[in-house]
Image: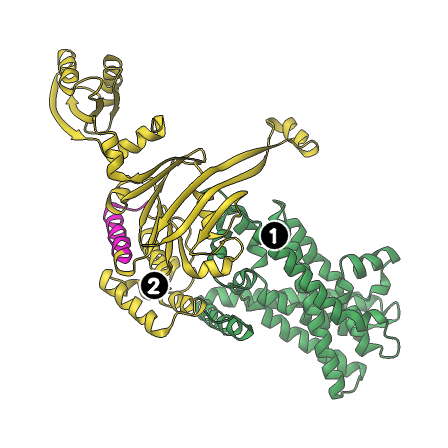
Amino acid sequence: MSAIIEIKNITKEFKVLNRREGLKGSLKDLFSRDYKIVRAVDNISMTIEQGEIVGYLGPNGAGKSTTIKMMTGVLEPTSGEILVDGNIPYQNRTKNAQKIGVVFGQRSQLWWALPLVESFKLLRDIYQIPGKDYEEMLALYRSLVDIEPLLHKPVRQMSLGQRTLSDILAAFLHNPKIVFLDEPTIGLDVSMKAKIRTLIHALNQEKHTTVILTTHDMGDVDALCRRIVIIDKGKMLYDNDIEHLKRFFGSYRTLKIRVAGDLSEQADKIQKEVPECSVSADEEWISVLVDEDKAGVMEVLGKLQKTHRIRDMQLEEISTEEVIKKIYEEGVK
Amino acid sequence: MKRKGFRFYFKIYCKILAQDLKSKMSYRADFIISTIGMIFTNISGFVSFWILFRNFPQIKGWDYYEMLFLYGFSLISITPVQCFFDNNWSLRQYVYSGDFIKYCFRPINLFFYYQSEVFDVKGLGQLAFGIGTLVYAWIKIGLGFTPLMLLKITVFLLTASLIMIALQNAAAATCFWIQNSFYVLDLAYRFRDYAKYPITIFSPVFRFVFTFVMPIAFIAYYPSLVVLRPDTVPVLSWLSPLIGIAFFYVSYRIWMFGAMKYSGTGS
């Protein structure tokens, strides 16, 4: 294993205009400008090995995109160092581009009017992919997904799922060392999500491609990533194995119960009764997250049984989703 | 990785162009309507020109056919910008919506990649109009024909095109800094109408502006003098190829500078 991305203490600051409110404020902005410095990424360091799939997580506005843009060479860090396969991305943007693939979930990079296969041929020329490698890659794609119906369809006419799939295939086509996937499964249905996860996993295994994945879908993380990096407000909160994180929250259990009446209303009531737990509700269950160091599950259940008629119950280990939620809320202490 | 020289880019451009034409042909109605639109725009421009000359047989010593020559010359010289650089018109939307970032990840020249995406076929019709007008005026003036003249007119047409392209590049690039760059681009586009007239008809202030600030006088007037008035060619005319290249280069650097500092929107 060798390091493919090395990031040392990078910081990115933006100068933003302090906008005043209302029309009068806007007029004032025209004449006197009042800037403030916003630190989007604050002193982040990490090393990523060749062949890893890293989940890069954080709430909206945490600085994920900014970090990705610095790794792809679109942005220059304010301070700190980034090396991508030995290159400084911002200074050698073209050279860097040859080694990476990028997919933005919502923004196709393919030629809108062209059938997929023509886009592939153009990419083959742009990236100067040798004919043999190109054919091998197409053969691999054929073995992994059913691409025949996609090949002759203009990208414009594809569904969102097909387009995302095509974009991912296009990003891997020149066999890059690293592929950045920015929310690849956003807006997709369950079966398409599964298809895309399988594809990413297979390509990573087959080509030993490093994958940096940003997502809000914990299903993606569970299916693909062993290591996760979490940032919030530009600062790194966590960088380690996902299992380690779960052990860290090992004393947590999720108690799922079903009671009579409107679930979200009941959940609010229950929250008041057991303030030490965090309570949420979906269509089927009320979930009570219990920290067993503070209160036993049976204790909580006993308390609730006195006031509610519990029709059904389940006990679960903490899910990745809840772990991440807790970290966003409280951080790792 | 091989070095990417002119041949590499030329090959890529031809392939993109061929694909683009193929997909455009598949929208027949679109193709026909835009061609008809182009023809009518040119005819109406020509008619207003003709009406003008019914009333004023001469403008500052320039007669009808000489003016027609200028007119044809300017039509040809705006063809390249129309055909090859039409994507400049969409730059503003790409930058504003954040979609411009998709152009930043390819291992080829960003400016080339961006402009290669669109080829406007309508420009070709305009080219035909322009050549027709120019040849007609040429014969009527009785300029005669030598290979040297052909060389001169070709060089100066290329020069004029470069300046037109440069003007549009620079205007489009303003969107990297300001939100409403459409007006700048539109202004640059409208100014080219003035390129059809001999600069001597304007007041000294505008003469200065059109020569040194917004060099539209180089789009048709100065280059045409070389063929039309070979006895009294000002130095500026001979300089125009250099000015064309320099101005194009500057506009390219401005465009690239803007593109490199582009940071995208949040996602």
The spot of residue B143 in percent (x, y) is 80, 84
Count how many numbered circles sit on residues in the image: 2
- Amino acid at pointer 2: Lys
The nearer-to-camera label among 1 and 2 is 1
Q: Tell me what hue chain B is rendered in.
A: green
Asked whether residue A232 appears in the rendered view, the answer is: yes
Up-down: is A60 above or below B237? above
Asked which secondary structure carries label 2, the reply is: loop
Q: Residue furthest front?
A: A2
Nearer-the-camera pick, B106 or B241: B106
Residue at 85% in and 71% down: B235
| Magenta-highlighted residues | A187-204
Q: Which residue is mark 1?
A: B258
- Amino acid at pointer 1: Gly
Q: Which residue is mark 2?
A: A153
Q: Tell me what hue chain A is rendered in.
A: yellow
